[in-house]
């Protein structure tokens, strides 16, 4: 599930047009905001994420407050906020939603117990497109990369255990993108390591399709903001 509520259909359309996941999310958010401008100075829910929550069956007023109280961090953060509500609180928030509005004068009462923003993690796989691998080969190499990187995370539990647990809790988000060639994968790995992100670079055994030692997939793990510094501009596979 995308952070900005990008649907499967929108993702497929983006792939066909050579867009990145960031492009699709920003375009959709801009379009929604034009049709539903926020009142100046008043906290509002992200329209794209609100639409997504309503689509999966959440009460609109409840979903709106959850997004505002989590500062529109993500759909996952809003769902977690809702999950922590008591029955009475949830009933009270849902009670006045028949009018279908996501506006509420009492949104400013969001609890400030957690000053630190939640951090969400993801694993990104950069596929070496220069090799011309078939679909099955790419799938196998991404599998190798996922297992290899997961072992790296488990080997250094003291350093990565907390972030790995949070990643698992929020759906183990994984994204596959296109890399130009082996040199780009190596450069991306160096950049990721300079940001202290764990990586795993797959070098194929050469049993099928490609020469032995070929650099096929780079896997990177970390919080979304840091990983996006490395792979955010690459196109979805």
Image (cartoon, rainbow, N blue to C red):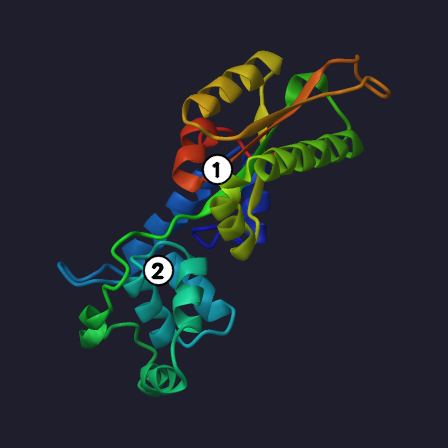
Nearer the observer: mark 1 or 2; the answer is 1
As displayed, is residue 49 above or below residue 149?
below
Crowding at dot 1, Cα within 10 Å, few <14 / some 14-19 / many 20+, comes out as: few
Query: Residue 69, percent across and down?
Result: 29, 64
As displayed, is residue 208 above or below residue 47?
above
Image point 31% across, 86% down: which residue?
96
Q: Give SS at disc 2.
A: helix
Give residue 138's quadrant in the image. top right
Name of the residue lying farthest toward the right? 207
Front residue (pair 235, 18): 235
Q: Distance between the residues labelled 1 and 2?
A: 36 Å
Crowding at dot 2, Cα within 10 Å, few <14 / some 14-19 / many 20+, comes out as: many
Query: Residue 86, percent across and down?
Result: 39, 81
Front residue (pair 5, 205): 205
Query: Residue 113, percent across and down?
Result: 25, 64
**Quadrant in which the C terminus appears:** top right
Residue 119 left/right relative to 45 = right
Q: Give SS at disc 1.
A: helix
Image point 34% across, 75% down: which residue?
61
Residue 164 left/right relative to 138 = left
Residue 234 left/right relative to 133 = left
Give residue 74's quadrant in the image. bottom left
As displayed, is residue 229 above or below residue 73?
above
User: Could you say which disc has been placed on residue 47 in the image?
Assistant: 2
Front residue (pair 197, 160): 160
User: Could you say which disc has been placed on residue 159 in the image?
Assistant: 1
Sooner in the amino-acid sequence: mark 1 or mark 2: 2
């Amino acid at each position: 599930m995308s952070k900005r509520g990008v649907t499967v259909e929108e993702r497929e359309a983006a792939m066909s047009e050579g867009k990145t996941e960031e492009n699709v999310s920003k375009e959709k958010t801009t379009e929604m905001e034009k049709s539903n401008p926020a009142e100046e100075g008043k906290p509002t829910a992200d329209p794209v994420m609100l639409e997504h929550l309503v689509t999966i069956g959440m009460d609109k007023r409840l979903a709106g407050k959850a997004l505002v109280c989590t500062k529109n961090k993500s759909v996952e953060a809003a769902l977690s906020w809702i999950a922590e509500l008591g029955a009475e609180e949830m009933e009270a928030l849902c009670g006045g939603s028949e009018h279908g509005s996501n506006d509420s004068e009492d949104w400013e009462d969001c609890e400030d117990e957690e000053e630190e923003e939640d951090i969400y993690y993801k694993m990104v796989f950069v596929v070496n497109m220069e090799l011309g691998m078939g679909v099955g080969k790419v799938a196998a190499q991404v599998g190798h990369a996922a297992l290899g990187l997961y072992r790296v995370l488990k080997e250094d539990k003291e350093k990565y255990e907390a972030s790995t647990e949070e990643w698992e809790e929020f759906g183990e988000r994984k994204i596959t993108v296109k890399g130009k060639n082996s040199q780009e994968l190596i450069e991306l790995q160096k950049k990721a390591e300079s940001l202290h992100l764990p990586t795993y670079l797959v070098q194929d055994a050469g049993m099928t399709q490609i020469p032995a030692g070929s650099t096929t997939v780079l896997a990177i793990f970390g919080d979304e903001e840091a990983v996006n510094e490395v792979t955010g501009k690459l196109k979805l596979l």
